[in-house]
Image (cartoon, coloured by chain):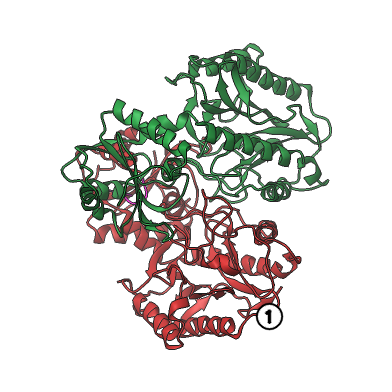
Chain colours: A green, B red
């Protein structure tokens, strides 16, 4: 096994260095990465196996399958993780005294097994280190997300054409899914943890927006089956309703998140006002969102504006209200930071986040805009550039 | 909190009793179920929270959200799991001395947190008990899976009409996805563990079938992005190739799994022969598959037939071969039993499994049939009834 890094994408090495800085902060000698999202983050590839990242030096890929890599450089084939220490020793790499595992991302059984792989080592939770590194995107990652934003907008441009009178919300969603897929959407949304399950996104029409959900999404919806209670419920869309479209922006290993609202016929003034309130919140957050701003300040500002306009009981839901207005986003839909009142995170340059101040107006539906942003010295810059006004179907 | 079970679906109580029998076997006093699939299994609903199942008596649902249940009977609202012991004591339910957690399904951090909820209790891994209970389906569960089979077949009937000359495999898949969704497919495949990531299924044409994958699927395929390496790769489908369609049968909380093969123009005799070999394997397994048969015997028989016909190097892949020919299926795509040589499981009545003896013929593509079966005293009965011959596009 030769250890050279020349064949790694320079951007991958930048991500590795970012992880290594976090490991140093957390006094961890090495991590053994095993979750799908973090294998992709630390290699820009996906394989079954583990990525061994020492606090300094070059990572080693321990691959179980597929059998397509050249076994050289930093790639070592193994049948099982128990083979790793011997392979490291063989390569002259010292075994870590303190090892990190992804305690938040891997199952209890998987972590217990990995703990036994390095029985002499102390172990720590390395999930926070990886989450913190991933929060700030590299140039290559930002380029992927800009690409996502362009494709997602291109697909949203065709949303109006997907509509036919007397369609159900689900039929409408299915046509949007097809448009997204033809635009290159992978049809799969990576999420972290077990509080999110979703197909290609959410289309919510009328009062279905007021059905509380079990998941950590801002909006609920009944869904069409009790096993997956969220989003479209299969009822015919009617005049006087809004239709909120919050569909997947996953066109590569990264993703953007964008919500826009359509209407059928005319809707009450209240709905327009709440929608404009969402846009005012976004404009304020865009200005405030420079490096150094507290994430919680964005949330507080949103609450201040929404309550100031008297929309308290519609903000972030009506029968059930979500306690956050946005979230980090990248490889997974729900990354750090969480934009809520309790956040201790501070904005940094090249952090990406989706902001989605939304309102549920009983008898009408959901309104509000969601954009995905990157933090710049001039404030938040949108990656999802698409008209924000309520459009007619 | 009143504890009555009258309002629970009788079938749910049958599943609970099945879990309780497993708990008794494993000497576990109670389990605290927290994974999405098992909350659905033990309630036929989905909520964020926990299901407390004592080894005898009625389960209690500890619900965090949504706020839609009546707090009475067996439903108790909590903000966090730490509130559970006090609520149990309040209801006169004794705290378990030995408690089970889903160590294979929940993250290390989640299980550690739950262990602290019952600090006096010994803890055990309850994942095996739940997996074993779920392996044998109730009548209600079988009815859901029969429903899935009917819908999936109905959609597969339209597959031929999805094809247009010079289409890419991905364009073809997108039209099949739309047909499935219009037929009621939920567009989301629940899987267990982190060795499966997939959108609505897999369409593999020609030599893309010979690209090894990292996941625990029988077939690989390059996919269209390195972040999700599986299935269609976006190339134009050509004459002389087979197209294997293995798309989702998830129409309710359960699912069926079915694979059929189409061809473009004429394909070599070898491909037909291998396809017929797959059908012979299925016919043999159907006969053998009575209660009491070892699962490993199905695998051994498949190997015997495939090798006997000289197809060893094409069976279950070519550049990379999968070490199993089938899997249990139900709420999740990959349930017990795993149909491989090492299996110690024995077939029982009302067990469901998908068998997929497949071959990859270099230069042509993948062939073979997959059906989902239920074990009956007369052998395996297919839930996926659809012509098995290779059809022309």
Residue at point 51%, 21% (across, down)? A349
Q: Main secondary structure of the magenta part?
A: loop
Residue that numbered label 1 is attached to: B266
The answer to whether A78 is drawn above or below residue B121 in the figure is below
Is residue B114 or residue B163 the one in the foreground? B163
The answer to whether residue A227 shows anywhere in this view is: yes
Residue B79 shows up from this direction:
no
Picture layout, residue B64 above or below residue B30:
above
Q: Is residue A236 left or right of residue A148?
A: right
Check the picture and name the quadrant holding the N terminus of chain B.
top left
- Image quarter of residue A58: top left
Residue A372 in the figure: left or right of residue B163: left
Residue A171 percent coordinates (x, y): 73, 50
Rate crowding at label 1 as few (under 14), some (14 to 19) or many (20 or more) other CA atoms within 10 Å.
few
**Residue drawn 42% across the image and 88% down it:** B308
Q: Chain of mark 1?
A: B
Residue positioned most to the left: A120
| Residue A145 among those drawn in magenta | no
Q: Quadrant of residue B328?
A: bottom left
Looking at the rendering, in which quadrant would you find the C terminus of chain B? bottom right
Magenta part of the chain:
B100-106
Residue B5 image offset from top left, x and y in percent: 42, 51
Q: Position of residue A94 (x, y in %)?
A: 20, 42
**Residue closest to the eye, A371 or A53:** A53
What number of labels is visible?
1
B99 or A294: nearer the viewer: A294
Q: Secondary structure under badge 1? A: loop
Residue B53: x percent and y percent?
Answer: 34, 50
Residue depicted at 40% across the width and 59% down the height: A65
Q: Is residue B10 above or below residue B272?
A: above
């Amino acid at each position: 096994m030769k250890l050279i890094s020349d064949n790694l994408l320079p951007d991958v090495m930048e991500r590795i260095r970012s992880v290594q800085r976090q490991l140093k902060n957390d006094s961890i000698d090495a991590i053994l990465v095993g979750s799908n999202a973090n294998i992709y983050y630390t290699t820009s590839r996906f394989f079954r196996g583990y990525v061994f990242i020492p606090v300094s030096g070059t990572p080693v890929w321990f691959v179980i399958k597929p059998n397509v890599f050249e076994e050289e450089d930093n790639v070592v084939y193994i049948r099982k993780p128990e083979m790793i220490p011997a392979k490291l020793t063989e390569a002259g790499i010292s075994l870590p005294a303190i090892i990190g595992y992804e305690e938040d991302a891997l199952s209890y059984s998987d972590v217990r097994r990995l703990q036994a792989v390095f029985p002499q080592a102390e172990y720590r939770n390395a999930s926070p280190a990886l989450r913190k590194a991933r929060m700030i995107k590299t140039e290559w990652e930002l380029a992927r997300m800009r690409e996502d934003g362009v494709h997602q907008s291109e697909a949203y441009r065709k949303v109006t054409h997907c509509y036919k009178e007397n369609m159900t919300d689900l039929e409408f969603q299915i046509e949007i899914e097809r448009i997204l897929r033809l635009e290159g959407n992978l049809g799969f949304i990576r999420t972290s943890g077990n509080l999110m399950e979703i197909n290609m996104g959410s289309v919510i029409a009328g009062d279905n927006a007021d059905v509380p959900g079990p998941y950590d999404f801002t909006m609920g919806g009944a869904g069409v089956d009790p096993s997956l209670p969220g989003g479209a419920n299969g009822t015919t869309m009617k005049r006087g309703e809004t239709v909120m479209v919050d569909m997947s922006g996953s066109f590569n290993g990264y993703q953007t998140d964008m919500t826009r609202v359509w209407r059928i016929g005319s809707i009450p003034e209240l709905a327009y006002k709440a929608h404009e309130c969402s846009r005012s919140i976004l404009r304020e957050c865009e200005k405030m969102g420079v490096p150094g701003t507290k994430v919680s300040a964005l949330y507080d500002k949103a609450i201040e504006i929404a309550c100031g306009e008297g929309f308290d009981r519609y903000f972030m839901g009506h029968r059930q209200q979500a306690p956050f207005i946005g979230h980090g986003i990248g490889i997974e839909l729900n990354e750090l930071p969480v934009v809520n009142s309790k956040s201790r995170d501070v904005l940094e340059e090249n952090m990406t986040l989706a902001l989605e101040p939304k309102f549920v107006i009983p008898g009408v539906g959901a309104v509000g805009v969601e954009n995905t942003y990157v933090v710049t010295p001039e404030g938040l810059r949108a990656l999802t550039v698409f008209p924000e006004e309520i459009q007619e179907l």
